[in-house]
Amino acid sequence: MNTADLRRFLRSLPAFERFSERSLDALAANMHLENYPAGHILTVQGQCGAAMYMVISGRIDVARVGVAATFSPEHGENQELAEGAIVGLLSFANIPSLGTCTCKDDVQLASLSREDYEALFSQAPGAAHQMQYMLAVRLAQVLQTQNRSLRQALHNKTAPKKSESLLKRWFG
Amino acid sequence: MKFGPASPCRSSYVIMIFSIVGLRLDVPMKSEIVAEFNTCFSSLSAQLGPENVDRLLSVCAVVNLPAHNELFRERRQVDSLYLVLEGELVASIEDGDNILEVGRVKAGDWLGEVAVLSGEMLTSSTVTTATRCRALKMHWHEVEQLMIHDEDISHVLLGQLIELLAERLKRSMAAGEKI
């Protein structure tokens, strides 16, 4: 795959449908194609990554522990990401990775480093603006899910106490 | 909406329209609000510049909130952003009688951005006024229009929102570790 192929690939994804042709050109030119073998660890939960990755081919396993395990209740503690998925976008806002991402197969990725993301602001403001919007939306979505999981954790913490007090009241 | 001089007759029409629509900014309030906005949101104001501050404020309404009042109830619908000018609010997550405070909101902070940006249009926490508060209210549709049609405003607003959301997420994660 070369930059032109990457550009076509980006155009086919819903996340980039609002990008102008110029913005897409700039983004593709700033991304780097990388290949990793199965088993390679891409991000570690709790550690801040240095880049955003987009899956071109292959599959990635995302494992979450602790409260973060409830971030994607539809996927449970483990989630599989495939072609077109984006990993590590929140690293641009200095947010630690929400899960540990491991390559399940031999994987090809397109990465955008933090430096390349920042360079977009002077090179192609339109592309930088679209990336900013994606980042803001992703942060808001994660915060919504995080607060839902906090509510659930609060409920789980107090539910046993409630049943204990009921048992005490009934049986002394 | 423009703030230019108007004839007495036109002014009264404008004020009448303002009172029908809600608490829109009217002509005499403009300079006071701009000054207050510049003080509370100094970084945002400096990045926007006077012309864009005017454009942003033209889609804002001033709202006054009494103390100990619920502005948002979690998981309820919201379609506006709030820029707090005065007072303090408390954001919390609730489960029955159990309340977990996830943040304090003061002058210079935003509210409602999680609901609108996530696309859920539902509040992620309950927000209650701890003191009497004043805020600027912007309908999300108007903010979206500014973002679509004006890259300068959009770039600044998104930059500020990203910083704010990242800070809120970190605070929420820290609150989670206390459970």
Image: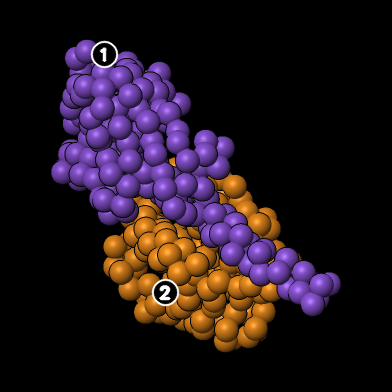
Chain colours: A purple, B orange
In the rendering, at what x and y percent does residue A58 appear? 33, 19
Q: Position of residue A96 (x, y in %)?
A: 31, 52
Label 2 CA crowd tier, 10 Å (few <14, some 14–19, many 20+): some
Q: Are dots 2 and 1 in contact, CB under 8 Å? A: no
Amino acid type for the residue under numbered disc 1: Asp
- What residue occupies the far right of the structure in this picture? A170
Report whether A30 appears left or right of B33: left
Q: Is residue A55 left or right of residue B18?
A: left
Residue hosting label 1:
A5
Horizontal relation, residue B5 to residue A112: left or right? right
Q: Amino acid at mark 2?
A: Gly
Q: Can you see residue B173?
A: yes
Please tell me in which quadrant of the rendered image residue B164 appears: bottom left
Between circles 2 and 1, the one closer to the viewer is 1
Above or below, comparing residue B173 to residue A141 in the picture: below
Q: Which numbered marker is on residue B108?
A: 2
Depth order, front residue of A103/B126: A103
Report helix, strand or loop for mark 2. loop
Residue B91, percent from left and from top: 54, 71
Task: State which chain disc 2 sits on.
Answer: B
Would you say residue A135 is visible in this rendering?
no
Q: Is residue A20 above or below residue A128?
A: above
Looking at the image, which is closer to me, A76 or A83? A76
Q: Residue furthest front?
A: A172
Q: Which residue corresponds to the image point at 61% horizontal and 73% vertical from the top-left?
A: B99
